[in-house]
Image (cartoon, coloured by chain):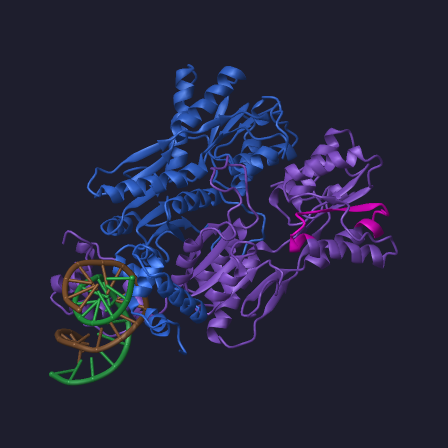
Chain colours: A blue, B purple, C green, D brown
Amino acid sequence: MGSTPTVYDVAERAGVSTATVSRVLSGRNPVLSPTREKVLAAIAELGYVPSGAAKDLAARRTGVLGLCFPDLVGDQDIQGDATYWYDEVIRGMERAARRSGYAVMIAASHESDDIDLVLGVAGRSDGLVVLAHTVPVPMLEHIAMRIPVVMLAAQPGLGEVAHVLDHVSVANETGAYEVTAHLINRHDHDRIAFVAGPPESPDSFRRFAGFRRALDACGLPVPSRPEFHGDFTTVGGRRVAEQILAEGTPPRALVCANDQTAIGVMKALERAGLRVPEDVAITGFDGIQLGEHLRPSLTTVVQPMSRLGTMAVDLLKQRMADPKAPSRTVELPVRFEPRASCGCSEAARPAA
Amino acid sequence: MGSTPTVYDVAERAGVSTATVSRVLSGRNPVLSPTREKVLAAIAELGYVPSGAAKDLAARRTGVLGLCFPDLVGDQDIQGDATYWYDEVIRGMERAARRSGYAVMIAASHESDDIDLVLGVAGRSDGLVVLAHTVPVPMLEHIAMRIPVVMLAAQPGLGEVAHVLDHVSVANETGAYEVTAHLINRHDHDRIAFVAGPPESPDSFRRFAGFRRALDACGLPVPSRPEFHGDFTTVGGRRVAEQILAEGTPPRALVCANDQTAIGVMKALERAGLRVPEDVAITGFDGIQLGEHLRPSLTTVVQPMSRLGTMAVDLLKQRMADPKAPSRTVELPVRFEPRASCGCSEAARPAA
DNA sequence: TTGTACGCGTTATCAC
DNA sequence: GTGATAACGCGTACAA
């Protein structure tokens, strides 16, 4: 007994067979009360915990759902002031999974890095959820031959050849359209510029598309390319601000590809003496918590982060039920949240 | 081949034995290049992913670390504005685990609820990390007979009989001492009250102890019990504020057991016309992100959340290396962060 | 109601 | 360098 106890140890100690132990544990089959007592006593004394590996192997299911998300900070320990937008995705998924009796296994990784980690998770799960830009698509298509795979917030179809991946995406284009139209119709802006994210970002691209559509619908000139390029970080936003200031007359309104960028731009412009929203209106995208507590509070488009997670679990379950169904894409609605930075008055809501 | 492919399928397709497939996968044994190619081709064609269950069973280790944390919101989906202090613990642990080649399996649960979930995680992990008040201590001692268990932010020894649990705790008492002494020595306060958390909270208790020690050290009268009782939520803080206002002359300074409470109190007092910190100074505890962006920014004691996670992994690894060592408790230092709500000037740091 | 014995998909230990 | 084969610990027919 130098090692961890097994069913055999429990059975021996209780004077029964391993099958009986198994029955007591599952509770699905009838066991005489005195027998059950003996088994439970043995379990308590030995500190027996069933081996998940053996159980999963025999049952051919694991009761685990995997989640892969990008590691944004690399290997260094962060200082404690960062909150990632996918924290809530994790929680949403965990909660939905638990309701369905699943545990969640998580793994962060850089694209094309940590292949073994990802495969390890995939091999131990009944289904896999992957955030965009975390795992190369070919590997996902490989994994999808074994278990259902759902991609979150990725451009459906991008780089896929087998079309076996389900998708949960958000209404990027609609959101950008709404916020842009709001600036035009509600605040009478006509010199509006778009601050993009990284050039290769599909999210940024879709949002720019919505931006253009709004300009077009309102009869304003439509740029073929974004006027400015950030990189989804506040630092990048700051750089954009410098560029704007250097170029002479700044636009009267800036639609930023995400909140971080907007915050960086806003802070830098304010430091240069411009007032937001009086001199320049600014909007973001994502709905990170910080934006709500800034002064001025940040007008944005809120993504339903928690629902991304729960919806992913839904799709996983559906596909387990019907593996042959054609691959699906669910687009989640976003919510336009006008706040102070676009010129609307500070919301009445308390800060906490 | 209607089902998921196994080593046998790969071996057959590649015209080799299962042992060779295993060798190619592990990369630990020499395999002739042409052989390897054939195997890799078969793997790609079949979409083969090794079964974690079988692997773990054979290897008698899982490469997974478990993490149990409390589910604060129960079963309802939250609105998207909540950030929990343990999000960062999760990330810290995930990162440390990954550096050591482990994946992380998470499970939220209410105390004494979801027993099967917790046992399931324990049975699939090489080590378990548990946040305080998540799993009943007797069950943890049971699990600890199988795999190492580390408790986070719990009162070491509380309710334990076997003393097999390792602990990572934070310097609650020291932190509360520091913040209280700061109010006395730096801001000349002498009418300070403590706003406790739930009566049964060890954290709240320890912080109150530090509060008392500071009063005592400075020659001020020492209360035997906290003057006010919140419940660690902003709503609870609001209620405390009402009580304070109803009772006549409010204290000149309030040391709150955590940030949420402090924020609730602060907002409610301000709404009643009191100024913070001029009329009443307020301090929190935890260092949640929101406190930094409030106006006035919240003076607090910052817990090293991320390090809780990394340290837990450290302890786990140490115990795996030496299972017989006496149980350990590591106390992590906290950092006193004076900001505006205690009377210090707004920090120069930018909001983003 | 309880016991026996086989299979689940790997890894590892032998021989070849 | 490669191929048989025996564990690993648990479900679960099937038999008793």
Residue A127 in sight in this render:
yes
Q: Is residue A78 above or below residue B260?
A: below
Residue B292 in sight in this render:
no
Q: Is residue B27 magenta?
A: no
Q: Is residue B291 left or right of residue A122?
A: right
Residue B154 spot, x, y in % from top left: 60, 59
Q: Is residue B49 left or right of residue A106?
A: left
Examine the image and state in which quarter residue A210 appears.
Answer: top left
Q: Which residues are magenta?
A: B183-204
**In-front residue for pair A287/A105:** A105
Examine the image and state in which quarter residue A92 appears.
Answer: top left
**Callout count:** 0
Examine the image and state in which quarter residue A53 appears.
Answer: bottom left
**In-front residue for pair A32/B309:** A32
Residue depicted at 63% across the width and 33% down the height: A351
Residue A223 spot, x, y in % from top left: 41, 24
Residue depicted at 82% across the width and 38% down the height: B250
Residue B138 spot, x, y in % from top left: 52, 62
Q: Quadrant of the C terminus of chain B?
A: top right
Q: Is residue A291 above or below residue A123?
A: above
